[in-house]
């Protein structure tokens, strides 16, 4: 599982600047998709062939000048959820009493079990590096002078982070296994742990906890009618029953990391409040990572099933989350067990769809349809897009490469048109379809 790195420190130490530098962008990990609110509290980073998430606590701490109870709650949550802590100091101020208080709190919250890197920021010139010696009074081994604004020692910081992160694949999956890896995702209090319990207790022939993964989350293995399923990081589902405001962001990022390990995500939504902003963010991440996606509308027992309530909810979900219209919708109740069997059946179907390939001769038929599109994209000079041929590059998810004269002419509407054509050729329900456009002038 990808690791999580939390940036912790006093206000104005430069946490957001360091976050932007590490992630290489000022935007969030959620794609710029209409209807999905962008968020700058978390981002992705890759270094030394390791992927990890970065949490920017600067967006939560705000401009508070004291290490208040509210800030302590956020630090405590960040320490619990992360794998490595970057404790950022303001090099202009040196080590303050607030820094010492934060250091003590980090030690108590982590039980000295989490690696800490003390990064003294705003040291643009090496002649001031002797100030770093003051940081050792905080009692942490790894201390480094950096400048987030001028990119000084950022690569050295990343080297140290990736060295301290736990291995990504401590719990390897058996080669040749037909195991389907699932993650139950959704906003707090939507019934994730209840759904897991209902699934694992209703039709199980084997249930076992599997420890040893990053941060020691607990996976759960279950066999239903001869098919092995693994529920990813089930400990995370039970970690706490209620979140307080922005604190849920930390576990939300852990959910994103769990999605990365899964094959299919069961996005659990509350029938009384579907399509929240967090639902949209999770769905966007699932699609970005190429995972299967199934919408499970829980607490259906609380809804009056008369008066076409199901049809109304389906329309709302399709209207509010149009980019995920390929995801099947299941109405369920973790309380009384309704829909549990259908969830398993749908998982099997989506898993099969993720592995599908389209034969070359059928793709050639698609090419004729694409070329017959009455208004191919063109530039201001009137040069139209030409599509020469295409091939399926991969499955998991189904991915297709189109060779064209000018890839820059491909518009989002045309790309969506092509994806719809691909879905007409084959049943890709529950799986994203990826298209890539490569330049190739004809001889």
Image (cartoon, rainbow, N blue to C red):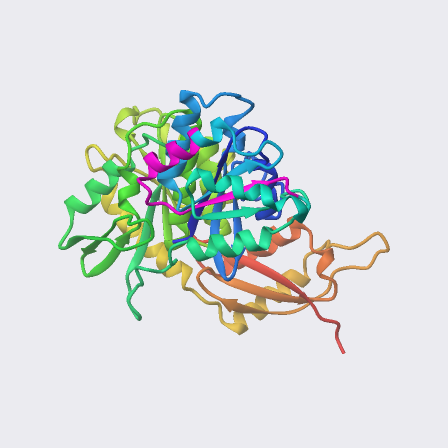
State the extent of the magenta-drawn residues as a range.
101-123
Q: Which image quarter: residue 110? A: top left
Quarter of the image for residue 312 reads top left
> In the displayed structure, does residue 334 sit left or right of residue 89?
left
Q: Which of 228 and 338 is in front in this view?
A: 228
> On the rendered image, what quadrant is the N terminus found in?
bottom left
Residue 320 x %, y %: 50, 33
User: Residue 340, image x and y in percent?
Assistant: 24, 43
Confirm whether residue 110 shows in the render: yes
Q: Is residue 311 magenta?
A: no
Residue at image location 54% in from the left, 25% down from the top: 62
Q: Check if residue 109 falls in the magenta segment.
A: yes
- Residue furthest to the bottom in view is 443
Q: Residue at x 40, y 64 (%)?
A: 355
Residue farthest to the left, as pictured: 205
User: From the viewer's perspective, is residue 190 above or below residue 228?
Assistant: above
Residue 224 location, x and y as percent?
19, 55
Residue 375 vs 253, above or below: the answer is below
Quadrant of the image for the C terminus? Answer: bottom right
């Amino acid at each position: 599982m990808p690791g999580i790195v939390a940036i912790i420190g006093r206000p104005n130490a430069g946490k957001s600047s360091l976050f932007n530098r590490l992630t290489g962008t000022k935007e969030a990990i959620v794609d710029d998709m209409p209807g999905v609110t962008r968020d700058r509290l978390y981002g992705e980073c890759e270094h030394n062939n390791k992927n990890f998430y970065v949490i920017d606590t600067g967006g939560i701490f705000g401009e508070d000048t004291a290490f208040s109870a509210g800030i302590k709650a956020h630090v405590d949550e960040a320490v619990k959820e992360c794998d490595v802590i970057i404790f950022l100091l303001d090099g202009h101020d040196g080590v303050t009493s607030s820094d010492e208080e934060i250091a003590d709190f980090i030690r108590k919250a982590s039980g000295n079990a989490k690696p800490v890197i003390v990064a003294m920021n705003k040291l643009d010139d090496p002649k001031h590096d002797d100030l770093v010696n003051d940081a050792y009074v905080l009692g942490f081994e790894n201390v480094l002078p950096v400048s987030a604004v001028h990119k000084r020692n950022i690569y050295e910081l990343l080297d140290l982070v990736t060295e301290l992160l736990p291995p990504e694949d401590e719990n390897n999956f058996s080669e040749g296994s037909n195991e389907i890896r699932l993650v139950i995702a959704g906003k707090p209090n939507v019934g994730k742990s209840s759904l897991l319990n209902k699934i694992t207790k209703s039709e199980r022939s084997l249930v076992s906890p599997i420890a040893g993964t990053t941060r020691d989350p607990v996976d759960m293995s279950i066999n239903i009618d001869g098919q092995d399923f693994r529920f990813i990081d089930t400990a995370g589902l039970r970690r706490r029953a209620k979140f307080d405001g922005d604190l849920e962001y930390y576990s939300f990022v852990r959910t994103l990391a769990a999605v990365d390990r899964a094959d299919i995500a069961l996005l659990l939504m509350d029938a009384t409040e579907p399509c929240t902003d967090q639902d949209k963010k999770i769905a966007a991440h699932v699609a970005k990572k190429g995972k299967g996606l199934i919408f499970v509308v829980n607490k259906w027992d609380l809804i009056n099933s008369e008066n076409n309530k199901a049809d109304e909810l389906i329309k709302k979900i399709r209207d509010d989350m149009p980019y995920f219209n390929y995801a099947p919708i299941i109405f369920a109740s973790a309380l009384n067990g309704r829909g549990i069997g259908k969830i398993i059946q749908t998982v099997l179907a989506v898993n099969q769809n993720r592995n599908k390939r389209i034969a070359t001769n059928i793709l050639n038929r698609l090419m004729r349809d694409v070329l017959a599109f009455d208004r191919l994209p063109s530039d201001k000079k009137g040069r139209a897009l030409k599509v020469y041929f295409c091939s399926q590059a991969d499955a998991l998810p189904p991915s297709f490469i189109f060779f064209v004269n000018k890839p820059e002419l491909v518009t989002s509407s045309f790309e969506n048109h092509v994806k719809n054509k691909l879905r007409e050729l084959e049943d890709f329900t529950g799986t994203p379809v990826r298209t890539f456009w490569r330049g190739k002038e004809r001889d």
